[in-house]
Image: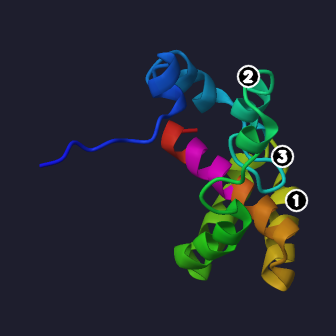
Amino acid sequence: MAPRFRRPTLTGCSSVSPRGPTTPLTAALPVSQKIRQGRTRVVARHALAALLPAEIRDRPGKAPIDLMLASALTVYGPERLDRLMTEAADSLDPYVGAAVVRQAHRAYRARQTMPEVRQVWRLALLALRLRRAGS
C-alpha cells in the first residue's frame, strides 16, 4: 500500500498544537470575534496577518457561513426556534434585553434576510450556551 500524504497544515508545519492554550482562549471569545460579516476564523486571520500572504490568509475556506446559517436555522425547525427564542428572552435579558430578543425574532420570522439570520443565530447560540452552563 502506498503511503498517504496529507496536505501541510498550520499545526503540522509550525509545531502549533490544536490542543494548546488557544483552545480555552477561543472558547471564551464572543461569537462576534469569531465570525464577522460571514467570515470565520477572524481572530486567526488577524493574528497571522504578518506571517501569511493575503491570498492564503484571506481565502474563504470550505464554504461561506452565511449560506449555512439560514439552512441550519431551518433544519433546527421553526417550532423549536420559536420555543428557544421565547425561553431565551428571559435568560438573555441581563445581556441584551428581552425586548431585543423578541424584536430580532419577529424580524427574522417576517423577513429572513441575512442580517436577521445572523442576529437570531447569535442570540440562539448565546441562549444555548447559557442553558448548557446552567444560567
* Marking on residue 96: 3
The residue beneath circle 2 is 51
Residue type (three-letter) at the residue carrying disc 2? Leu
Frontmost of labels 3 and 2 is 2
SS category of the residue bearing label 3 = loop
Q: How far across and down, in percent of the image, does residue 86 sit?
A: 68, 66
SS category of the residue bearing label 2 = loop
The residue beneath circle 1 is 99
Q: CA distance from mark 1 to mark 2?
A: 44 Å
Q: How is the image coloured?
A: rainbow
From which residue to which does the magenta span run? 124-130
Residue type (three-letter) at the residue carrying disc 3? Val
Task: Name the side, left or right, on which 74 lies relative to 109.
Answer: left
Q: CA distance from mark 3 to mark 1?
A: 8 Å
x 38%, y 41%: residue:
6
Q: Residue furthest left?
A: 1
Q: Is residue 31 visible?
A: no
